[in-house]
Image (cartoon, rainbow, N blue to C red):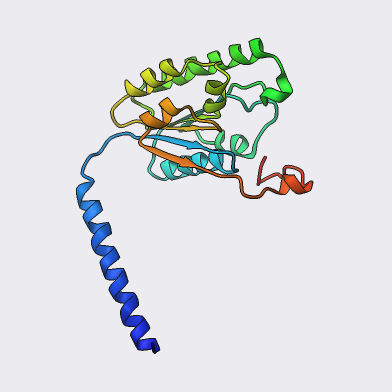
Amino acid sequence: MNKDEQDIRHKQRMQRKKEIVDSSIAKATEDRGVLVVNTGNGKGKSSAAFGMVARAMGHDMKIGVVQFIKGAFSTGEEAFYRRFPEIDYHVMGQGFTWETQDKRKDTAAAQAARKIADSMLCNQQFDLVIFDELNIALKYKYVDIDQVLDATKNRPHNQHVVITGRAAPQALIDAADTVTEMPAIKHAFQNGVRAQKGVEL
């Protein structure tokens, strides 16, 4: 097959693909808030959520962030996003569960975070809310899954919610509109590289 024939076949494939994509776009006519879940053992769940924060800022949206587990040290995203008045940012965690080793303290912190999260889910001024590492709080039952599902179900019609963390419960996955699972294929930490600013911190 010569180059001209390859070009013709490529164009034909892209034309067929465009027909499929255009058909899918034409069928998507509903406008409403979506529930997004980023889970899995791989890196990037929170990073993807904060990428959505940047995107929402570009559309002049009001944003709420509640971090359920992180909190023992300042992260780059916290240092950056706290600069912007359109973002209501709350770091509520006591640190990773294997560091705190205190279920009562972790539960109390998660419950306090849930109250702030619930207040955002009742407030139509928030266009996008991020509940970072909420899945961990759900896994250890610091927060009740039924309460979370009820609050997200009854939020303002156009409000978007992003929930991150490993081990998302099946009930949350079932309720979500979009779920992304990030697998752990390879990580520098496994080869003795410490967490790096701008990458993990």
The count of marks equals 0
Quadrant where the N terminus sits is bottom left
Relative to 19, residue 66 above or below: above
Relative to 139, residue 201 above or below: below
Q: Residue at x 42, y 22 (%)?
A: 120
How far across and how far down the image is residue 38, in percent?
49, 37
How far across and how far down the image is residue 153, in percent?
33, 23
187 and 79: which is toward the camera: 187
Relative to 114, residue 22 above or below: below
19 and 116: which is toward the camera: 19
Is 173 positioned to the left or the right of 158 in the image? right
184 and 116: which is toward the camera: 184
Quarter of the image for residue 99 reads top right
139 and 158: which is toward the camera: 139
Q: Residue at x 42, y 31 (%)?
A: 173
Relative to 43, residue 23 above or below: below
Q: Residue at x 69, y 26 (%)?
A: 72
How far across and how far down the image is residue 90, in percent?
55, 24
Is 145 positioned to the left or the right of 191 in the image? left
Toward the right, the furthest residue is: 192
Quadrant where the C terminus sits is top right
How far across and how far down the image is residue 35, in percent?
38, 33
